[in-house]
């Protein structure tokens, strides 16, 4: 008996749910809310995954920097410098250290770093060797 009373409600719910889902998708597409992996709701933009051509900060910070010609390690990216517009304008590289000692922090413009992918990993290259970086002015946080 109880199942018979719930049957019309279940049938109605089953009929309405797909219509609501479809109308939400159509509304979102008509209003430009869905674009790739980005979606806008209530004026806020959300991502279900990183957009194509982008990367996470932890794919940069902590990565080794190599000299382009010799492929030798010359330092490690220890921080990002972000401009007022939210774009990366530079990186802070710590030159080679021994057991965490020595080395110096050097600030370089983002355009001085070349990022490439090798085996699904970010690899960073500069045209300066380690000696040139050690002789560069030390980066000082203000």
Image (cartoon, grey):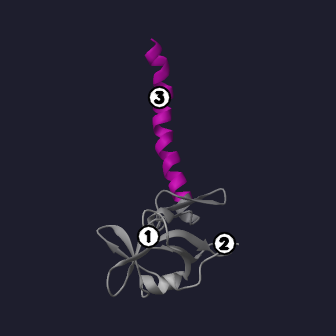
User: Where 78 falls versus 128 (above or below)?
Assistant: above
Q: Badge 3: few (under 14), some or many (20 or more) residues near its Cα, within 10 Å?
A: few
Estimate the spatial distance between the alpha carbons at disc 1 and disc 2, rounded to whole Å. Answer: 32 Å
The residue to which callout 1 is attached is: 52
Circle 3 or circle 2, nearest the eye: 2
Residue at (53%, 52%) from the top-left corner? 23
Task: Magenta stretch: give its range.
Answer: 1-27
Q: Quadrant of residue 107?
A: bottom right
Q: Secondary structure at mark 3?
A: helix
Q: Are marks 1 and 3 in contact (CB under 8 Å)?
A: no
The disc at residue 141 is: 2
Q: Main secondary structure of the magenta part?
A: helix
Give the mark nearest the N terminus, 1 or 3. Answer: 3
Q: Secondary structure at mark 1?
A: loop
Estimate the spatial distance between the alpha carbons at disc 1 and disc 3, rounded to whole Å. Answer: 41 Å
The disc at residue 10 is: 3
Q: Which residue is more in the foreground, 134 or 14?
A: 134
Residue at (44%, 74%) from the top-left corner? 75
Give the mark nearest the N terminus, 3 or 2. Answer: 3
Give the mark nearest the N terminus, 1 or 2. Answer: 1
Seen from this angle, which residue lies furthest top?
1
Q: Position of residue 109 (x, y in %)?
A: 55, 83
Residue 21 magenta-highlighted: yes
Indicate the quadrant containing the N terminus: top left, top right, bottom left or bottom right.
Answer: top left
Circle 1 or circle 2, nearest the eye: 2
């Amino acid at each position: 008996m109880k199942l018979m009373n719930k049957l019309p409600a279940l049938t109605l719910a089953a009929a309405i749910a797909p219509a609501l889902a479809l109308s939400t998708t159509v509304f979102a597409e008509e209003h430009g809310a869905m674009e790739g992996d980005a979606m806008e709701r209530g004026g806020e933009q959300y991502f279900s995954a990183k957009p194509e051509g982008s990367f996470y900060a932890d794919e940069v910070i902590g990565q080794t920097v190599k000299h382009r010609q010799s492929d030798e390690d010359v330092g490690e990216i220890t921080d990002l410098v972000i401009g007022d517009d939210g774009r990366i304008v530079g990186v802070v590289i710590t030159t080679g250290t021994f057991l965490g000692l020595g080395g110096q922090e050097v600030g370089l413009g983002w355009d001085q770093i070349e990022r490439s992918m090798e085996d699904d990993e970010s690899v960073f290259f500069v045209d300066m060797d380690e000696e040139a970086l050690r002789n560069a002015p030390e980066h000082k946080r203000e």
